Amino acid sequence: MDKYVEMIRMRFLMMLAYRTDYYTGILIYSINIGAYYFLWNAIYGEKSSIEGLTSIQMTTYVAIAWMARAFYFNNIDREIAAEIKEGKVAIELIRPYNYLGMKTMQGLGEGIFRFFFFSIPGMILVALIFPIQLPYNPVSWGYFGISLLLSFVINTQINLLTGITAFFFYNNAGLIRAKRVIIDLFSGLILPISFYPFWAQDIMKYLPFQGISYVPSMIFTNGFSGSEIVYALLQQSVWVLILLIPIRLLWTAAKKQLIIQGG
Amino acid sequence: MFYVTMFFQYMSQYMKTRLEYRADLIVEMISDFLNQAVNLVFILVVFGHTQFLSGWSRDEIIFIYGFFLIPFALFSSFFNIWDFNERYIVKGEMDRILTRPIHSLFQVILERMELESLFGVVTGLVIVVYAGSSLDLAINWYDPFLFILFAIGGALAYAAIFIAIASIGFWSDAKTSIMPMMYNIGNYGRYPVDIYNKVIRFLLTWVLPFAFVGVYPAAYFLGKKEWYAFSFATPLIGIIFFTLSIFIWNRGIRKYRGAGN
């Protein structure tokens, strides 16, 4: 266990060394939030609410969705692919830890760093510029925290899956890019899932993606009622468990198939 | 003339290298296409909940987006200089560029071409034709020519912003993240400027003329008379900003001292 905590700490410190890169990141996210803020304002126009969300809730949704993304987002799929390409993965596999577990911990270290140095200051900045309503109920904050953690796990699991495909394809850069677009669209980052036409919602119900952005953001904006929150959290947890299966299968297959090209 | 032959030389060389790795090329084009599709999906879903966006209908917004893709594709194929600072200044590559017999900016452009982005022109045209025909837009004989003129004007305006920012590298070789920021601000030009507040509208028109890439030129084809003055200014704005950016670049070259070994 200690070694995994150490992994988190190492990655955190590594990120800390390059923290200035992140100030512009906050600005970029704020610019994006701004674009969607104006767009949604125009969309709302005279309407007081759409699909149960008021325009202030919508602004809050956009802001928290982007700032939460800073926490759950990581590039471990790209890192895994790079390590496979360079042959480094051979060394990693003989080290006394679980490779995928270690990658997850590195992602978590990165996430914790971004949470404190990106999400929180970013959220404060955005709250100063745009009209945003923070949850006043401490219980909502608690639910939000749990849900955010689960969203990190789901996103990381999907990243592990796409990363492992590099064992089979060698060049999976295109797949990684496609995954990113799919997550942006189906996770609820750019549009709350409840805005989609019903047939699309029906499909997305059976996909893990809404656990990444839609659920935590809806909890934060008070868009879910009590029982909906519990149901959504359960759904996220179930997805965490389900996703373990393909990871396990793909990982076993990948190790059998591994050919190290130099290294 | 020499410039034209150089251009085609580099272009054929580029095609050869890219076609060597076809699978990679196709994947890249698909992921570009996916990106464009996501923005379209956003517009479509949003208009499931509203009739008008500040007085613009769904098909009009789609038309603007389609138009935007065309100058944007031209820009990203030929002005792929977002990593100019790291690639040329920090690594000292600029020294090599300066020994070449053609203008330094032209040399950089030739080396950094990304012709597969031109596929965006096709996507853009398909979207424009689709939106245009569902709006029943009347087409005059001179409209296609204006379309080309406006698209080039928009691409020049876009390029000018990035050339000017790349030139900052000549004065300071510190790593800046202004480039990715600009890409994100550029997205503001995809939507009608009347949804923004006055300050942003002013910025998008006169400081970072991203509005001339999408909404202003597209307004002419949509028959929005109140924007005509801006529409017809598009090529002019493109030329003025582009000339200005070349001027900044040339000044920067004189300041350039070289880095590395």
Image: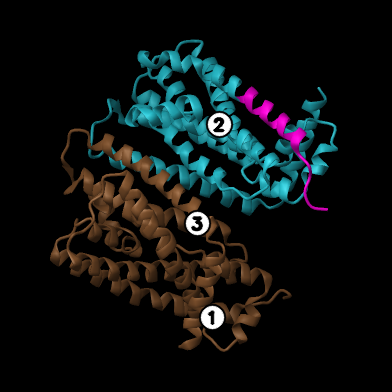
Chain colours: A brown, B cyan
Same chain? Circles 2 and 3: no
Tag 2's secondary structure?
helix
Closest to the observer: A248 or B2? B2
Which amino acid type is marked by label 3?
Answer: Tyr
Among the 4 quarters of the image, the one containing residue A244 = bottom left
Q: Is residue B149 left or right of residue A199?
A: right
Tag 3 subunit:
A
Distance from the alpha carbon under mark 3 to that under mark 1: 28 Å
Above or below A220: residue B165: above
Q: Which residue is mark 3?
A: A22
Q: Which residue is mark 1?
A: A99
Tag 3's secondary structure?
helix
Q: Are marks 2 and 3 in contact (CB under 8 Å)?
A: no
Q: Which residue is mark 2?
A: B158
Magenta region: B242-261
Distance from the alpha carbon under mark 1 to that under mark 2: 45 Å
Residue A229 screen position, x and y as percent: 19, 66
